[in-house]
Amino acid sequence: MSERKVVTRMAPSPTGKFHVGSVRTALFNYLFARQNGGKFILRIEDTDKERSKKEYEADIIEAFDWLGFEYDEFYRQSERTEIYKEQIQKLIDQGYAYISKEEVKEEGQRNSVIRFKNPNKLVKFSDVVLGDIEVDTTDLGDFVIAKDLENPLYHLTVVVDDGLMDITHVIRGQDHIANTPRQILILEALGFQRPIYAHIPLILAPDKTKLSKRHGALATLEYRDLGYFKEAIINFMALIGWNPGDDREFFTKEELITEFKLEKVQKGGGVFNIEKLDWFNKHYLNKQPKEKLLSAIKQYVKFEDESVLERALPTLIERINKYNDLQNENLSFYSHVPEYGADDLVWRDSDKFQTKEFLSQIIKILETADFSSNESIKKSLWSFAEEKGRGNVLWPTRYALSGLPKSPDPFTLAYILGKAETIERLNKAYKKIESITF
Ligand code: GLU
């Protein structure tokens, strides 16, 4: 066994979009193959003609491309009918399988299927994750492996492919553990070498229920479309059911290829926590080069003036975990003079007459202020704000600049907008309040 070149496979059925939970199975297979200088195969299991769709296959391939899970070989089970036919025939010829007539009660017709003749024995295997497993297959009866020679079913196709593709390690979810004894029986009958099995823990929601959309678990490419980084997805998924044995948390794909240990995968307790994913994403967001951030942000907010965007960048990034969070922010004031009512400018402890007076002085102060940073702006305005009451001065300034009850602080806003725009907006605010104090 030790001389066999490592070959792993990801074998998704294209019956839905490639779910994020499957990313981890693909990742573990990919990492294990790469760290052993082996082969990683992508095999589309599309024998279920009704449920398999080309669009889902395309989605799987696109997700693999996005994540950078390069595969060395690609197969489609629907193109391998002849191969399965030959193997089924072999099983029948050698007495391991037989055609059985099924009673179909309602129409009284008899349909035939191909069944595997169960030797009713004890199947033993040692799972890398779950340890030694023993199953008496008697209870499984003679199970169906194909509808007919042209229509093989899952257990048969998996075993034939794993055998002919020389798969050395079957790494898959624990939802497949119950399939393994049947597959071992077929494999022995066909004379293939047994792979090593590693059944990895299922991924649960934080409350230990079945993972679903409401926990933020989506199709893989939806994360891309929300502006998550593939580096974050990979890093996050790698640590569901596996850890390096110390407190390191950040791993690139290349580091994982070296560090990942299949024998260290836990038996259970894999939890998908979307906040953790956001936290990883924030880490990778903070590492993005400025040019990438600028061009990504431009897809969400239109900035008339490029220099405004440049100055706004740290403020924008600070408030989000992923690009799409920008959609929940009201950002139009960066490029448009905000709309608001004159009364909005008045701080709760103040009145409109005072506010008018304060605004005129704020304008005077800022006209000669140093706008090279938000600190320098703060410096020039701060003593006036302390003297007249912070709310009295800072509230109307902020409102004049953003038109919003919640926004970055007025010094940051003034710095981002620049002196000319700041003064213009404050003058507008002054005129607005002037119009109601006549
Ligand atoms: N096609 C199966 C599935 O989508 C996977 C088979 C396997 O990994 O053995 O769940």
Image (tube, rainbow, N blue to C red):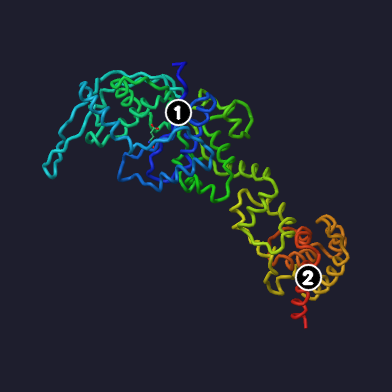
Q: Mark 2: give few (<14), some (14-19) or many (20+) Cα within 10 Å.
A: many
Is 339 above or below relative to 98? below
Residue 410 screen position, x and y as percent: 77, 61
Q: Which quadrant is home to the N terminus?
A: top left
- Judged left or right of residue 161, residue 257 is right
Q: Nearer the viewer's eye, disc 1 or disc 2?
A: 1
Looking at the image, which residue sits at the far left? 108
Q: Residue at x 86, y 67 (%)?
A: 367
The quadrant in which residue 49 appears is top left
Quick check: which quadrant has ligand 1? top left
Tell me which residue sits at (46%, 38%) in the image.
Answer: 22
Q: Nearer the viewer, residue 151 or 214?
A: 151
Q: What is the C-alpha distance between the residues marked 1 and 2? A: 65 Å
Residue 292 is situated, as x and y percent measured from the top left of the image, at 66, 49
- Numbered disc 1: secondary structure: strand
Q: Position of residue 89 (x, y in %)?
A: 23, 27
Under mark 1, the amino acid is Thr
- Residue at 71 percent of width and 53 percent of height: 313
Depth check: 359 or 289 in front?
289
Q: Are marks 1 and 2 in contact (CB under 8 Å)?
A: no
Residue marked by disc 1: 8
Quadrant where the image shows the C terminus: bottom right
User: Is 32 on the left or on the right of 161, as rendered?
Assistant: right
Please rate how many residues cluster around mark 1, counting C-alpha atoms within 10 Å: few if below 14, some from 14 to 19, many from 20: many
Q: Secondary structure at mark 2?
A: helix
Q: Position of residue 74 (x, y in %)?
A: 42, 35
Q: What type is the residue that disc 2 sits on?
A: Leu
Give the residue number, with chain letter if any, for mark 2.
426
Q: Earlier in the sequence, mark 1 or mark 2?
A: 1
- Seen in the picture, residue 252 relative to 289 is either above or below; the reply is above
Q: Which mark is residue 278?
A: none
